[in-house]
Structures are given as structure tokens and as C-alpha cells.
Amino acid sequence: MRLFIPPMIRLLGRLALVMPISMLTSSAFAQQTVPYIQVSAGGFKSMALRADGTLWAWGANSDGELGIGDPTSASIATPRQIALPNGLPPGSTWAQVACGTSHALAVASNGSLWAWGNNGYGQLGTGSTGRGFSSRPMPVVAPAGTRWQQCAAGNLLSLGIQTDGTLWQWGKDPASISGSWYETPRQVVAPGDGPGTRWTQVSGGYYHMLALRSDGTLWGWGVNQYGEVGDGTQTRRYSPVAVPVPAGAPAGAYWVQATAGRLFSLGLLSTGTLYGWGWNVNGVLADHTSTLQPVPLPLPANAAPGTGWRQVHAGVAHATAILTDGSLWTWGENVYGQLVNNTQTVPLAPTREATNGVWAQVSGGHVHTLAIGADGSVYAGGAERAPGPDPTNYWNRGQLGNGSYNGSLVLRRTLAVTLGRRKASQTAYQVYPNPAHQWLTVEGLPVRATLKLTTTLGQPVLTQSASRLTRLNLGNVAAGSYLLTIETDNAPPQTLRVVVE
């Protein structure tokens, strides 16, 4: 799907060095930083994916939802690594992760999909609900040869997009009056599906789901009691219905991202304008009333001319979004400091996080927020004790990863960029931003080079000649995890992992 970014200065928040996939250990090698490329906050837990393909988790673990093989601990306050399952091909890594309320999903580099945590409604997709949980990654049931490129986890449901562009759903069906569920993936079909159409992004909320297609259309389905589906009704939707582009949008505008909260939704247009719909509890729709259709959310009053929104993510009752200048803004519920603006008051408009940093990616959980900074490190905030005489911090389960059960009203570094190793003779290419949207910039190239973007399975996506500083147009590249190989005349090829949102 094409993603539009308005004219802007080059982000200061670049991830300056992306670690080559193969991490070598000879004494002749020099150290190089390994940034984190994705964070996912869900329920009272946190997960982070590093550029070397390792996956880290911390927070609530009563249902084994951290995937570390320890189901007896109520929480883990220090990040732990999630081991790769047995049986994966040599050299496999993790490629994408999604946290739900009490379970999680992850795609491996060979395209297989894995799930762990609570399985009471079949949300692990293993074909059974007989076991209450799994504390280690279990394979999601799919025919032999199935390859996944993206996953999403909601409350008691899971979703995934396969490499052929088809969309699948399993776990509890929020639209079902009888409370039915599916223990294995079931294909989701919408009007107009057919040759040439592909699903490119999906988001799972508490009681509804949102998904984007390659033609820039947005679709929603679920309970829809408060209009959170966005089709202008409060009709329960058992299958996807179109969310129209708002009437006031410029001609030719299309949807580029959408995210589902508890009872509200947020969507980003190609114009860089952000819209919200559903129940406006705690100001998640800014100063609007609850609405059945998308309404525009304001840009910050001091935003630079030409600035638009670049990325948005909905927590349970709060919202987080990044502008094209890399600044991070939050709004909605703030009882636990999850807006990380150094207060516990509720604003009716986006407010900037307190450190005034530059950010690459953000994710909101129940009462906390995660973000990747310009330095490639992971930061966390929120999960603070609610104001009042009760000293108990009920909702801090270690999800800030700071080794304690203390919250924070601002973003603080949890996982620093770690050190890997590379050949001393290799060039330290700069690849940013990562995750990428419309463009991916590569710096430090010689006069002549070739850039090859492939899927994690090695399928070619695009090839481009390059020199010095080059920008790859990702307008027709679907969201997912990819490998970028840089070939030059005077150095061995280097393969870097990049994520497209």
C-alpha cells in the first residue's frame, strides 16, 4: 500500500546503524550497536524485537503470556529473552510480534506463526482450548506451506495476514451473540475480495477489528455498540464493512493505517490527517463527542507547518501517535500516567510526552506506553499508582521492565541499544527510519551499489541501483518484515532486517 508523508526535514530520530543479520564472533571483528525495531504493549506486558531477530518480554505472566516457559510467576520485572521453538530452520529469527490482553503472537523468519499465553477461547489457534494456557510458543494450525507476514492480537482474539494477502481470524468472535469462538484460523472475506486485492494491515481491539487493503480501503467488524466499527451505524457486524473516507478529506485521499482500542478506533489518511470514531471516554477522540463516523483529530497547536501524523497506536483507553518530525503525542485516560506527559490529568487534545524526544515507534497497553527512541533503545512509562490515599499500585506488573514495580510519569529507558559484532572491514551503513513507511533511506554507500529488498523467505520485492545516499520508495510494499541486501564492488554483501508499517 502507498503511504504518503508530507514534505519534512529529515528525521533526527534515525536508527543510525542496523545490525547485519549474521552476527559474527571472530576476534578481528569490531563492535556495532544493535537497535530495537519493534515494541508491542498489550495487557500488562511488554515485548520488544531487536534488529538481530531476538525477542524480549517482561511484565504480567500469570497465563504464561511472556512465552519464556515459566507459568508460575505472576510477573517478570526485568526483560527476558523468548527462545525460538525447536524445529525451525538453522539461522531462524523472530520477525514480528503482537501482544494481546493475556496472549501473544509472533511470526518467525521462515513465515511460521507461533502463539502463547491464555487459550481459553482458542486465541492461540492450536486447534484446542483443552489447555488453559501455554507458556512457550506453540505453532498456529495452518496447512503445510502456509506462510504468514503479519499478526495482530486483541483481547480474546487473534488475526493474521498470509503472504498471499489473505486475512484470517481465530479465538473469540466479538460479534457473536452466542459467544462462539474458533480454535483454528478462519478466513475473513470482504466485498470486493478477489484477484489483485490484498490485505496489508490488521488491528484487533476488545470487541472489534480493523483491516486495510492494498487499494487503500479500510474495513471494520465487531460489536459496534458505540460506532467503533466506523460505518456510521451501531449495527453488529459479523463480517467486514467499509469505513468511508470522510467527506471533508481531499480528493484521492485513502487510508494508510488504523488501530483499534477498547471501544474506539483511530485511522490515518494519506494526507497525514488523523481521525477517530467510537466512544469518546477520557477524551480519546479529543474534544469531540462520541461519534459513529470518523472525525478529524487536531494537530498540536505548535506543530511545524507541513507536519502530519506518521504513526498511531491505540491502547485500551489512551492513544499514542508520532508526527512526521518524530515528536510523540498522547491523549485519553491518564490515571496511571500512561500519557507520559508528567501528569495524571486528562487532556482533551494531544499533548507531547515530557522528554520532548524524537521517536521511531510507539505502542500503548492497558496502563503503560512503550516507544523506540532515536538511539534505537526501548523506553517505557506509565503504570503509576493512581492518585489517592491507597498506596497500592494494583496495575503495575513489571511492564516497564525497570526491575521494580514502580511506575513512571515519563518515558525512561528500559532496554539500551546492545552491542553485537561485525567484521571490522564492513561499512557501517545507516538505514532509517526503521520501521519504515513511504521511504527507506540508506546512507554511507559507495558510488555504485545495488539494493535488494526481499521477504524473510527470500522472495524478491524490489531491486534498485544506488549510490551515496539513496531512498527506496516503499509505496507498493505491504506492511511486514523484510531483508535488505546491500551489494557493492569492494565489500561483501550485507543483509539488514527492516520493518515496513
Image (cartoon, helix red, strand yellow):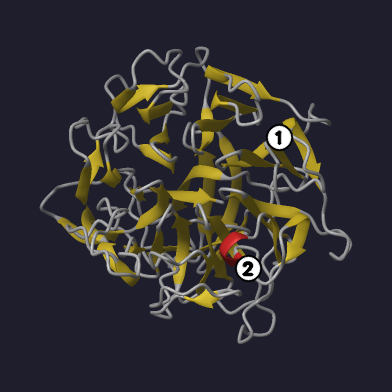
Please give the label number shown on residue 387: none
Can residue 116 be seen by looking at this rendering?
no
Indicate the amino acid at tag 2: Trp
Say if 391 sits above or below 87 in the image. Answer: below
Q: Position of residue 490 (x, y in %)?
A: 38, 57
Front-most of 270 and 329?
Answer: 329
Are the residues tagged 2 and 1 within 8 Å (C-beta)?
no
Front-most of 174 and 321?
Answer: 174
Please give the label number shown on residue 198: 1
Q: Secondary structure at mark 1?
A: loop
Q: Secondary structure at mark 2?
A: strand
Q: Check disc 2: other Cα within 10 Å, few if <14, some if 14-19, many if 20+.
A: many
- Per the model, the C-alpha gap separating discs 2 and 1 is 24 Å
Say if 470 sits above or below 82 in the image. Answer: below
Q: Position of residue 307 (x, y in %)?
A: 65, 77
Please give the label number shown on residue 309: 2
Say if 387 sits above or below 62 in the image. Answer: below
Q: Check disc 1: other Cα within 10 Å, few if <14, some if 14-19, many if 20+.
A: many
In this picture, residue 398 sits left or right of residue 113 = left
Front-most of 5 and 322?
Answer: 322
User: At 61% from the left edge and 20% from the top edge, which residue is drawn?
Assistant: 186
The residue furthest left is 27
User: Which quadrant would residue 89 be assigned to in this image?
Assistant: top left
User: At 19% from the left edge and 60% from the top edge, which residue is drawn?
Assistant: 30
User: Which quadrant would residue 90 be assigned to in this image?
Assistant: top left
**Mark 2 or 1, nearer chain start:** 1
In this picture, residue 269 sits left or right of residue 282 = right
Q: Nearer the viewer, mark 2 or mark 1?
A: 2
Indicate the amino acid at tag 1: Arg
The residue furthest front is 389
